[in-house]
Amino acid sequence: MTDERIESQWWYNDKTGEVEQGLKSTNRHHIGPFATRDEAAHALDRIQANNERADAADTEG
């Protein structure tokens, strides 16, 4: 990913709980990239939903 593209993407910082545009802090605390600020702000909701779907698939299979 080019620097310009990285700087235009949105990230959720799971250490601070803040949404950042571009990589402002260490990568190990970033979830993303996301196309919009709103998507990044709901990163943990998306992760929880994905985990619930995977758990449901595990119990069905």
Image (cartoon, rainbow, N blue to C red):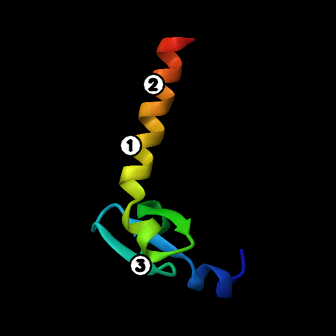
Q: Which residue is mark 2?
A: 55
- Indicate which disc, 2 or 1, sits on the residue closer to the N terminus: 1
Q: Is residue 24 above or below residue 50?
A: below
Residue 19 placement, left or right of 53: left
Quick one: SS at disc 1? helix
Q: Residue at x 52, y 13 (%)?
A: 60
Q: Name the mark on residue 24.
A: none
- The local crowd at label 2, few if under 14, some if 14 to 19, many if 20 or more residues have their Cα within 10 Å, is few
- Indicate which disc, 1 or 3, sits on the residue closer to the N terminus: 3
Q: Residue at x 44, y 36 (%)?
A: 51
Q: Position of residue 32 (x, y in %)?
A: 52, 63
Which label sits in the foreground, 1 or 3?
A: 1
Q: Position of residue 61 (x, y in %)?
A: 57, 11
Kind of residue at disc 2 = Asp
Q: Residue at x 56, y 67 (%)?
A: 33
Kind of residue at disc 3 = Glu
Q: Which residue is mark 1?
A: 48
Q: Position of residue 4 (x, y in %)?
A: 66, 88
Res 34 quadrant in image? bottom right
Q: Residue at x 38, y 61 (%)?
A: 42
- Mark 1 vs 3: CB contact within 8 A: no
Res 52 quadrant in image? top left
- The local crowd at label 3, few if under 14, some if 14 to 19, many if 20 or more residues have their Cα within 10 Å, is some
Q: How many marks?
A: 3
Q: Name the mark on residue 20.
A: 3
Q: Nearer the viewer, residue 35 or 3?
A: 35
Quick one: SS at disc 3? strand
Kind of residue at disc 1 = Gln
Pick the quarter of the image with the N terminus: bottom right
- Mark 3 vs 2: CB contact within 8 A: no
Give the residue furthest to the bottom: 4
